[in-house]
Amino acid sequence: MQIEVSGKPVELADGASCAEALKEGLSKKQFKKVVVAKCGETLLDLFAAVPTSCTTLTPVFADSEEGLDIIRHSTAHLMAEAVKKLFPTAKVTIGPAIRDGFYYDFDYERPFTPEDLEAIEKEMLSAVGANKDFSCTTMSADQARKYFADLGEDYKQELIDDLGEDEYTVYTNGDFADLCRGPHVARTGMLKAFKLLSVAGAYWRGDEKNKQLQRIYGTAWQDPKALKKHLHRLEEAKKRDHRKLGTQLDLFSFNDEVGPGMALWHPRGMLLRAILEDFERKEHLKRGYDLVQGPLILKRELWEKSGHYDNYRENMYFTEIDEQAYGVKPMNCLAHMVIYKRKIMSYRDLPQRYFELGVVHRHEKSGVLHGLMRVRTFTQDDAHLICRPDQIEKEILDLMQFYGDIYSLFGFDYDVELSTRPEKSIGSDEDWEVATESLRQALDKFGMGYTVNEGDGAFYGPKIDFHLTDSIGRSWQCGTIQVDFTLPERFDIVYVGEDGDRHRPVMIHRAMLGSIERFIGVLTEHCAGAYPVWLAPVQARVMNVTDAQGDFVNEAQAFLMRRGIRVEADLRNEKLGYKIREAQVEKTPYMLVVGDKEVEAGCVNIRARDGDDPGMVTLEEAAQLILDAARAPFEAGGMSYSFSG
């Protein structure tokens, strides 16, 4: 048989393996970096025979996205083999590849310890040195069920019963066998760059009614250099952990007496929020939005009409007042539709753009709560644009420009993802097709590359998601744009067209920063707590050397406050070096030192957070320097700076 390998025609004997085929088309150096083969969209083990229907075979290299997934999945199997060898009574469940790594869940009588992880990792390295083959066997359902029953692996039997397939593949490496679709690397010796990271509890199949398992997390890469780089990034992420910085900067806290997933905002943190929210309101007003607000709870009948009750109620809280059931809002769209219906709108009135910084509540499971990144109560920067169908494209293009301006201001690069209809959804096929195509056409016209995430749209419409990349390379989903034909139909909202008839508008749901809490968490880690000068809750701190300068420090503080600068005075009876170090730890942008010489000259000595020390300047010069630093990112982005402390 003849196939094409990396652009070269290759003649193969019948039954030749993928490895044999790739060796014909690649150099030895290239082949060493191959983990599996690919025919069309099908990934194949290197030891697998080339399918007779295959006309083109391509290599999947270790440093590719698909290659890394294979390495990580294979390393999960390697880890499971080590666990079974060291802890024979442990039962295996599932072990997938995930972003930057892998995990495997085990049913074991006690939690694994850090010492256990060291022993497991040592055993994994031993298996790598042995360079054992991965092999694959196909079994009928009955054979597979009996095979895992004989091994005492109850969870595998349950998976076989639930999947209901006629046959299954079982992969073996060393003494370990696992129910798995594959493919895998050819030998354990190809897995040379991994590290076990942590242990956490996890419910079987994510259901808290099921047994809690022990989940071991690890990371794996194509080579030791890439692993070292990733581990360094993890160490940097620990330093930037917003939960740690939230305490260090005295911004927010969580308290068990209040409840999990509910942040308490301290004075500085609340000021940070207020500045950010004020900025958002002004930017939306500039772009033709109206500010609105809906109540925290709405009658259950509204949630039933919208479809949230059937499709989202497991994430909602409910209460009852005067024998009337209410739902605590998890999103703001329903109130906005009711506001729209307060009067009959003309085609000339559209689009209507409603913006609300709305407090919402969502029932997140306790196991997924994580600082500000995943909470149960948060403020969403929600807007809903109600427009004519012919206005959809322009509104989406304007939104994409708006988002780009704001993300750039904060120093974020971003990627875009188009998410399509999920399995659980409402609305007609035609509406979904029109909505999805509207988003696709807008993305194409804007000229931005994007990926398609099949089946991950909202239950009422497709969406564009914006993934921000932070300063250490991590991706965070924040913004979203969703086109919805369904809710306007369910709520019977209309406008009077140019022809005098009533027509159905389209609703665009959108959030730019998303959850304010989560965005502050992301931004805190992005800038390691050193917020841009315009956003810093304390922009400057004036500090004396001795008590003799106290009056001038107060005068300097009052002067700067009149200029709209957020400034604190530090008059404590502490050494100057201690005061400066404390201000640096708190990421204060400017430290203004006052000694006898400064008092005599009517000046302050400025030390900047970034290491730039302008030295002794007048109060007016100090004020201008701070205000210029606050304005700089706005001017760089062609935006205006119009707020003060």
Image (tube, rainbow, N blue to C red):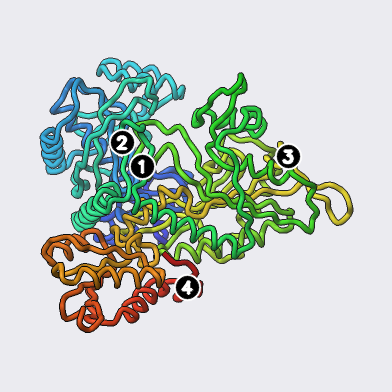
Q: Amino acid at mark 1?
A: Leu
Tell me the SS state at disc 4: loop
- In terms of sequence position, does the residue under pointer 4 or pointer 2 come before the other? 2
Q: Residue furthest right?
A: 500
Q: Amino acid at mark 2?
A: Asn
- The reply to whether discs 4 and 2 touch (Cβ–Cβ < 8 Å) is no
Q: Residue at x 39, y 56 (%)?
A: 272
Q: Amino acid at mark 3?
A: Glu
Residue 489 is labelled as 3
- In terms of sequence position, does the residue under pointer 1 or pointer 4 come before the other? 1
Residue 264 is labelled as 1
Q: Residue at x 15, y 25 (%)?
A: 87
Q: Residue 606, relative to residue 434: is it above or below?
A: below
Residue 131 x, y percent position in the rendering: 16, 42
Give the CA distance from mark 1 to mark 2. 8 Å
- In terms of sequence position, does the residue under pointer 2 or pointer 3 come before the other? 2
Crowd around label 1: few <14 · some 14–19 · many ≥20 (10 Å): some
Crowd around label 2: few <14 · some 14–19 · many ≥20 (10 Å): few
